[in-house]
Amino acid sequence: MSATSVIPVLLAPVYAADPQTLADQLKLVRTGRESSNVIITTPRDKTLLAVQEFTASGLPVAPLGQVLADLLTLPGRFAQEADQLIDHLGRTDPDWSE
């Protein structure tokens, strides 16, 4: 058995066509950046919202390339999360092996 270092996720970035409507539906409370744990935004590439892949529970899944690009460019500790995801993919997905 091997151990894997895990970076705890502190902020959930979410894409939505209408961020305010989604925030209202989820009953989220607006806070300052220092205390927020969810960011809802509209993607620059609107095709991201036309996702065709879903989890077993019906949640839409963003394309892996988009997830990595966002993790590498969002402020905060997301670059560490991107590194963790890339390491995991390198171990588990033959397409990501060197």
Image (cartoon, rainbow, N blue to C red):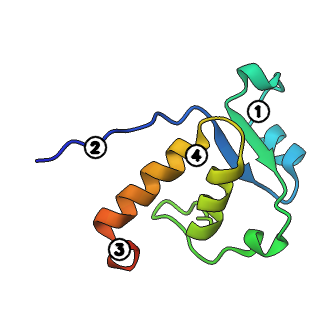
Tell me, yes or no, whether the two marked residues, 3 and 1, touch with CB atoms within 8 Å.
no
Image: 54 above or below 78: below
Three-letter code, disc 3: Glu
- Residue 79 numbered mark, or none: 4
**Residue denoted by label 1:** 27
Of pointers 3 and 1, the one earlier in the residue sequence:
1
Three-letter code, disc 2: Thr
**Residue denoted by label 3:** 98
Tell me, yes or no, whether the two marked residues, 2 and 1, touch with CB atoms within 8 Å.
no
Q: Position of residue 26 (x, y in %)?
A: 73, 39
- Please tell me how crowded label 1 is: few (under 14), some (14-19), or many (20+) other residues with Cα within 10 Å: few
Q: Nearer the viewer, residue 85 or 40?
A: 85
Quick one: SS at disc 3?
loop
Question: Residue at left 34%, top 72%?
Answer: 93
Of pointers 1 and 4, the one earlier in the residue sequence:
1
Q: How far apart are the two marked residues, 3 and 2, measured between alpha carbons?
A: 19 Å
Q: Nearer the viewer, mark 3 or mark 2?
A: 3
Tell me, yes or no, whether the two marked residues, 1 and 4, touch with CB atoms within 8 Å.
no
Q: How far apart are the two marked residues, 3 and 1, measured between alpha carbons?
A: 44 Å
Question: Residue at left 32%, top 77%?
Answer: 94
Q: Quadrant of residue 90?
A: bottom left
Q: Nearer the viewer, mark 2 or mark 4?
A: 4
Three-letter code, disc 4: Ala
Residue 63 showing in the rendered view? no
**Residue denoted by label 2:** 4
